[in-house]
Image (cartoon, rainbow, N blue to C red):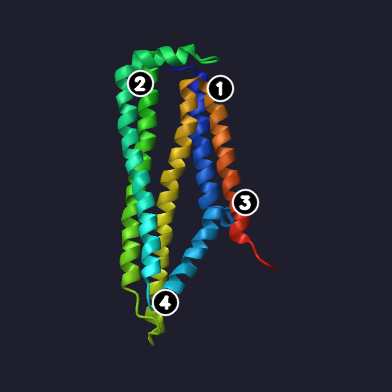
Amino acid sequence: MTGFATLDYAALAVFLGAWFVYYCYVEFSTHGKGSLNSIIHEARYEWMRRCYARESRIFDAQIMSGLQNGTAFFASSAFLAVGGTLSALSFTDAALEVFHALPFSTVTSRAAFEVKVLGLAIIFAYSFFKLVWSYRLFNYVAILMGAMPLAGSTDKDAAEQAIQRAARMNISAAKHFNRGLRAYFFAIAYLGWFVGPIAFMITTAIVAIVLWRRQFASESVEAATWSAS
């Protein structure tokens, strides 16, 4: 590819590998069950059970509204980011001058810069589609919550099925939201490539470590697993 050195390909491989490994580690490995995401997924099951037991579910509807609004905000931000990133193609020469003036930056060609910009746009586009689908799924959760049997229903099997459906849909929506938000973080790491391949690998490592710490070794994890005993 025009304008790219071997080190650029190596840095891109590190970036994609880190994203893929982190994704598999958090969502599919046995260690991932101790992540903050997994802990909160279990809380979603408990939430749906409490929702079924409540006669008035206005409180649950307010929570769902908050989740939907937050997802819509990030989805609209990702859409704007796609447009903003593509608009940078109109200022390629000016952008190249800025990056070349940065310390430790490497000289890159116009074609290479444009390919990098398109790559960044693809990341934001991926985030947008994940977040929009998450928003749609949270709508489905709200419908399933509304379709739950009334509290105290004698049909326990139907009640349990309704709880499981709503909880699983809730978890599915959360997973897509987390994937979309994860793309945001890795987009930050991707910006290092505009400085140079070494900076790209460094920013990738920093973002991966920060994400791992937040999921497995942060105060948030301690709060979610805290027990008085």
Q: Which mark identifies residue 114?
A: 2
Q: Which mark is residue 113?
A: none
Residue farthest toward the right in the current orientation of the protein: 229
Mark 4, mark 2: which one is toward the viewer?
A: 4
Q: What label does residue 219 carry, if any?
A: 3
Residue 200 rendering spot, x and y as whole percentages:
52, 26
Cα distance between the residues tagged 2 and 1: 19 Å
Q: CA distance from mark 1 to mark 3?
A: 31 Å
What is the spatial separation of the Cα atoms under label 4 and label 2, in whole angstroms?
55 Å
Element marked by disc 2:
helix
Of residues 78 and 11, the one nearer the viewer is: 78
Q: Earlier in the sequence, mark 2 or mark 1?
A: 2
Mark found first going from the N terminus, 3 or 2: 2
Q: Which residue is mark 1?
A: 198
Q: In the image shown, does 172 or 12 lie closer to the viewer?
A: 172
In this figure, which residue is indicated by the disc labeled 4? 54
